[in-house]
Image (tube, helix red, strand yellow):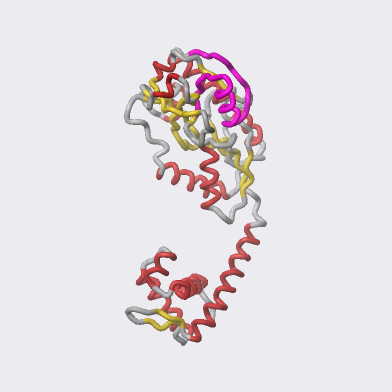
C-alpha cells in the first residue's frame, strides 16, 4: 500500500499535539479536514492509530509505531528534497547594496523559497548590473530604469516593484531634526550632502533631478558605497542627505519624511527574458504578491513627485 506523506504528516502532528484543534491550526487546515484525513488513513491501514473522545486524544500501540516510523519517513523525504534542490542552478540576484528595498525583498524571497538556492550580488547600482544581466550572468536585478546612461536592451523586461518615499537623514542636532516632517521648501535652506557610488548612475540622476526641480543646493558631493558610508559622512560633516527610509540608523542620526510633495523613488525588477532561470517566474510572482500586500505601489494621499521619465514609464499622471 502506498502512503500519502501528507496523511503521515497529519498523524505525526496530531500525535505531537494530542488535540485536533491545535494540530489543525499548526497544519493550517480545518479541524474537520484533519479528522477526515486521519479516519481515511486508519481505514486504509485497517487499524486505529488514535483513540479519541470529546476531551482526550491518545495514540494506540499501532499509532505509536506509525508515528515513530512516520517521523523517520518525513525526515527522509525532507533530506531527499533538500538534496535534489542542491543540484539546482542558483538564482542569481543583484540587490545593489545592503539595507535597500531589494535587500528587504530578497530576504522575503529566500524565506518563501527555502529549497531554491540564491546567490546574492551587490553591484552598487543597476547601471553596473546591466552588463551581467545582458550576458546572462545575473537572473534578476533591481533599480530605477532611467538615468542609466543608456536605454534598456530589448531583451530585458521590467516590472514595477515600489514607489519608495525618500526622506532626509539628519544629525540629531540639526535645525530640521526638531520637525516631524520636513517640507521640501524648508530643505532648500540647507545645502545637501550628495553621496553616490560611481556605479549608481540612476540614483545620481534622480538626486540631480530633485535638486533642479525644487531649487535645492549641494554642499558636498562624495563617492562611496552603502548606507553605512552615507551615515558616517552625514555624522562627520553635518550636512543632510536624501535617503530611502529603509533600514536602521546609527546613534546620532535621525531620518525625517519629506513632504509637500513626497519625493518617490521608483524601483523595478529587471530580468533577461532570453537567459533567466525557470525559477524567475516564480520569484516574480512572489515579488508581485509582496508588493501588493505591502501597498508598495500606492501613491501618497497628498502631493508627490516623480521625475517625468519615470511618470511616463509607469503611466502615472502628474501628481
Observer-nearest of 7 and 273: 7
Q: Is residue 212 visible?
A: no
Q: Classify residue 43 as left or right of residue 199.
A: left
Q: Residue at x 53, y 14 (%)?
A: 218
Task: Specify start and end residues of the magenta stretch as a single range.
Answer: 217-243
Closer-to-camera residue (308/181): 181
Q: Eyeballing the image, is 218 above or below 302?
A: above
Q: Which of these two is toward me, 81 or 108?
A: 108
Q: Position of residue 203 (x, y in %)?
A: 54, 25
Where residue 253 appears, x then y in whole percent? 50, 28
Along the line of sight, which residue is nearer the eye, 229 or 304? 229
Q: Based on the displayed image, in which of its 4 quarters is residue 219 positioned? A: top right
Above-or-below relation of 125 to 61: above
Residue 230 seen by the camera: yes
Answer with the quarter of the image where residue 72 lies.
bottom right
x, y percent for residue 177? 43, 24
Is 5 on the left or on the right of 40, as rendered?
A: right
Q: Quadrant of residue 307?
A: top left
Q: Residue at x 34, y 78 (%)?
A: 55
72 vs 114: above or below: below
**Membership of 233 in magenta stretch:** yes
Amino acid at each position: 500500500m502506498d502512503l500519502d506523506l501528507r496523511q503521515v504528516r497529519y498523524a505525526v502532528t496530531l500525535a505531537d499535539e494530542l488535540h485536533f484543534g491545535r494540530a489543525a491550526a499548526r497544519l493550517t487546515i480545518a479541524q474537520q479536514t484533519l479528522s477526515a484525513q486521519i479516519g481515511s488513513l486508519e481505514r486504509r491501514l485497517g487499524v486505529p492509530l488514535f483513540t479519541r473522545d470529546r476531551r482526550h486524544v491518545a495514540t494506540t500501540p499501532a499509532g505509536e509505531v506509525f508515528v515513530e516510523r512516520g517521523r523517520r519517513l518525513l525526515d527522509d523525504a525532507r533530506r531527499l528534497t533538500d538534496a535534489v534542490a542542491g543540484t539546482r542552478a542558483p538564482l542569481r540576484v543583484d540587490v545593489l547594496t545592503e539595507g535597500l528595498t531589494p535587500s528587504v525583498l530578497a530576504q522575503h524571497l529566500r524565506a518563501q523559497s527555502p529549497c531554491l538556492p540564491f546567490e546574492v550580488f551587490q553591484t552598487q547600482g543597476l547601471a553596473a548590473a546591466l552588463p551581467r544581466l545582458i550576458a546572462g550572468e545575473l537572473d534578476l536585478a533591481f533599480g530605477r530604469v532611467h538615468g542609466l546612461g543608456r536605454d534598456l536592451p530589448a531583451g530585458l523586461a521590467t516590472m514595477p516593484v515600489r514607489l519608495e518615499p525618500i526622506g532626509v537623514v539628519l544629525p540629531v542636532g540639526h535645525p530640521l531634526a526638531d520637525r516631524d516632517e520636513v517640507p521640501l521648501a524648508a530643505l532648500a535652506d540647507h545645502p545637501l550632502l550628495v553621496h553616490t557610488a560611481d556605479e549608481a548612475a540612476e540614483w545620481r540622476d534622480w538626486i540631480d533631478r530633485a535638486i533642479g526641480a525644487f531649487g535645492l543646493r549641494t554642499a558636498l558631493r562624495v563617492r562611496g558605497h552603502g548606507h553605512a558610508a552615507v551615515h558616517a559622512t552625514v555624522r562627520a560633516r553635518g550636512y543632510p542627505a536624501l535617503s530611502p527610509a529603509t533600514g536602521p540608523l546609527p546613534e546620532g542620526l535621525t531620518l525625517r519624511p519629506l513632504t509637500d510633495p513626497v519625493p518617490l523613488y521608483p524601483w523595478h525588477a529587471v530580468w533577461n527574458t532570453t537567459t533567466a532561470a525557470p525559477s524567475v517566474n516564480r520569484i516574480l510572482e512572489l515579488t508581485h504578491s509582496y508588493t501588493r500586500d505591502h501597498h508598495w505601489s500606492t501613491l501618497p494621499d497628498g502631493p508627490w513627485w516623480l521625475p517625468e521619465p519615470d511618470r511616463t514609464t509607469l503611466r502615472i499622471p502628474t501628481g
